[in-house]
Image (cartoon, helix red, strand yellow):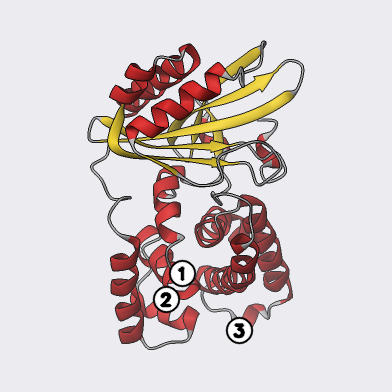
Amino acid sequence: MSDDAFLACRPRLLGIAYGLLGELTEAEDVVQDTWLRWDRADGDAVRNPEAFLVTVASRLALDRLRSARARREVYVGPWLPEPLVTDMETPETKAIEAERLSLALLGALERLNPVERAVLVLRDVFDLEYAEIADILERPPATVRQIAKRARDHAGDSSRRRPVKLEERERLADAFLLASVSGDVEQIRELLAADAIMYTDGGGVVTAARKPIYGADKIARFMVGVQRKDAYPDDPIFTRVLVNGDPGVRMDSKADGFLSIAAVEVADGAIQSVRFFNNPERFPAEISL
């Protein structure tokens, strides 16, 4: 089978697998398994290489997602998707269109069962026709349409807000970091939407809040409490990054190395959510950019 056909489709396969699984490492394994199936396939029987590859990758990712759900149910604290972290100056270094797979969207997808998630990712993110998705899932197109409608209702519209210019998102993210480090509770509160939410993913490996924190006031007081407890190192190194297309900050220590990655979601002139990725065991790919 042609390597060129596979390589041309690889970014899409990786994006689909990541959209279904929320984990880049797992998605890369799916793509590798897809390649093995492709390499063994009968070339004369494959009329549409892209359709074949997308079908294989989608089914493999769906199988992995079903088994992954059990692991996530016993995860310590909030389970967050594996972040796609890119340098601010060279965002093209990842072979996935990050703006299509925002953390807000991936969070909304967690509310869905595996089949609903597959339909929504394939239809709303990667623009497959209902007939194509029906072939992948081996279900009638009418059924797939019904699943799509149900999935959209369950996922909600939090991930479909009006787009905000990157400059505005960066401004609010920088202001939030500065206010947090300085312990300015009033400034933090003003930057956040009243119903903002914060997630901290420690996985029981490092100290982190084990439940989401809701509301601007509670988030502000939590951040100031962290600052007062000297949770920040004496030698912090802050690096501006993009996290799934949203502005973020990576924090390292000269003595201890990687500490955390923070991503800020902005909409309607305020910070809607903040996600802290603190568990180094879950995000080995992000320890060295």
**Measuring 50% from the left and 72% from the top, which residue is drawn there?**
114
Element type at mark 2: helix
Crowd rating for badge 3 (residues with CA inside 10 Å; few <14, some 14–19, many 20+): few
Residue holding disc 2 = 133
Q: Nearer the viewer, mark 3 or mark 2?
A: 2
Expressed as whole percent of the image width and height from the top left, the position of residue 280 reads: 70, 38
Of callouts 2 and 1, which one flags the residue occurring earlier in the amino acid sequence?
A: 1
Of callouts 1 and 3, which one flags the residue occurring earlier in the amino acid sequence?
A: 3
Expressed as whole percent of the image width and height from the top left, the position of residue 121 reads: 42, 63
* Amino acid type of the residue tagged 3 in the rendering: Ala
Crowd rating for badge 1 (residues with CA inside 10 Å; few <14, some 14–19, many 20+): many
Q: Which labelled disc corresponds to residue 118? A: 1
Q: Which labelled disc corresponds to residue 164? A: none
Quarter occupied by residue 129: bottom left
* Amino acid type of the residue tagged 2 in the rendering: Ile
**Measuring 38% from the left and 58% from the top, which residue is drawn there?**
125
Quarter of the image that includes the C terminus = top right
Residue holding disc 3 = 45
Quarter occupied by residue 151: bottom left
Q: CA distance from mark 1 to mark 3?
A: 26 Å
Nearer to us in this view, 212 or 14: 212
| Residue 110 located left or right of residue 210 | left
Q: CA distance from mark 2 to mark 1?
A: 9 Å
Q: Is residue 249 visible?
A: yes
Vertical comparison of 38 with 4: above or below: below
**Measuring 52% from the left and 35% from the top, which residue is drawn there?**
92
Quarter occupied by residue 46: bottom right
